[in-house]
Image: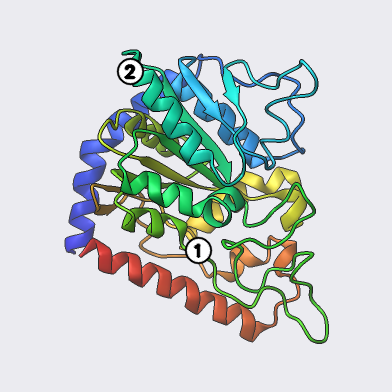
Amino acid sequence: MHNRLEHLIWLLRDRTPIKRTYESLKDRPDGVSPGFAACVGCNAELALRLTTRTLGPDVIMAIPPGCMGGCAPGYGRESGMKVTTVMPLMDNAAAMASGLQRAIERQSKNTRVVVFAGDGATGDIGLQCLSAAAERRENILYVCYDNEGYMNTGVQRSGTTSTGTQTTTTPVGKAKRGKPEAPKDVPMVVLASNAAYVATASTAFPADFAHKLRKAANVTNGLAYLHLFSPCPVGWHFPPEKTIEIGRMAVETRFFSLWEAVEGRVRLTRTVYSPRPLDDYLTLIGKYSHLSPAERQALQVQADERWARLKRLLG
């Protein structure tokens, strides 16, 4: 009852600004060129367009190598972006953005530096750099689009790849059953690193995502981090028209929860009181098609444990 009351209070307090945020974006141009070279049904491209549309033109996008890093800079003298964009290395995006933001602040400008990076450049190769930037309270905005793998180099597993996933480096056969390890919880790592603002988001809930982007852009006393659930049709093996449906199903099954933390205080931004069975999500995605009923049940238990841990943080 207590949680339901808190959620009702949040609905009354925050739904109006969320709706207002979404309404304000309908006619705004995004900062991505029409002929962008991403795959059909790419969730990361959709997120990049929504990010630039929400934040406006006065930004510097730092996009390291990855799916979007292969598309945004373009080829030769051509660029896939309409806003200023730089390409850091995979391991130093947060450090490069920190230096840029400090230089901008010395010039008394309001330009926002925004890192837009995949899970490999965020939770694996660049995690040390990101954690250090959060600990130093650098005033950068960092968006991670988590498609659970290194997709643009051939679909290899990453730290955030979910258990049981079939990738080129976690094959399925007589001896192997996909990735054996549990996924790394990067938002919680960043939260523990003393970031000023941490949130999870999904393009299946665009108003919530845009609202969190605007809140993150207004943070001036530390690092703001958004972890975006990003289904990948190519790497996950599902039809491209199912991208948004899968993103929504991940939330409705509590496989991925929407929450935010301001200075360490966590609250849900979407409460799922009666979650659907995780099997409803798993059956939509080819990378889980080999799982046995027992292995699917183990993933359900893992999702329930993640939810329980989040609930403990909520108090």
- State the image coordinates of residue 187 (x, y, percent, origin top left): 42, 55
Q: What amino acid is found at the position of numbered circle 1 in the picture?
A: Phe
- The kind of residue tagged 2 is Arg
Q: Which residue is mark 2?
A: 106
Q: Position of residue 46 (x, y in %)?
A: 61, 33
Looking at the picture, the colour scheme in use is rainbow
**Residue of label 1:** 255
**How many numbered discs sit on the rendered protein?**
2
As rendered, which of 227 and 130 lies closer to the eye? 130
69 vs 93, left or right, is: right
Up/down of 44 relative to 34, above or below? below
Q: Quadrant of the C terminus?
A: bottom left
Residue neighbourhood size for the residue with mark 2, other residues' Cα within 10 Å, grouped as few (<14), some (14–19), many (≥20) = few
| Residue at the image position 24 percent from the left and 52 percent from the top | 264
Spot occupied by residue 307 in the image (x, y as percentages of width and height): 39, 68
Q: Identify the disc placed on residue 103.
A: none
Expressed as whole percent of the image width and height from the top left, the position of residue 39 reads 77, 38
- Within 10 angstroms of label 1, few (less than 14), some, or many (20 or more) residues? many
Name the residue located 63 percent from the left edge and 61 percent from the top edge.
Answer: 158
Cα distance in 3D space between marks 2 and 1: 43 Å
| Dot 2: element | helix
- The residue positioned farthest toward the right in the image shown: 174
Residue visible at 41% across and 23% down in the picture: 112
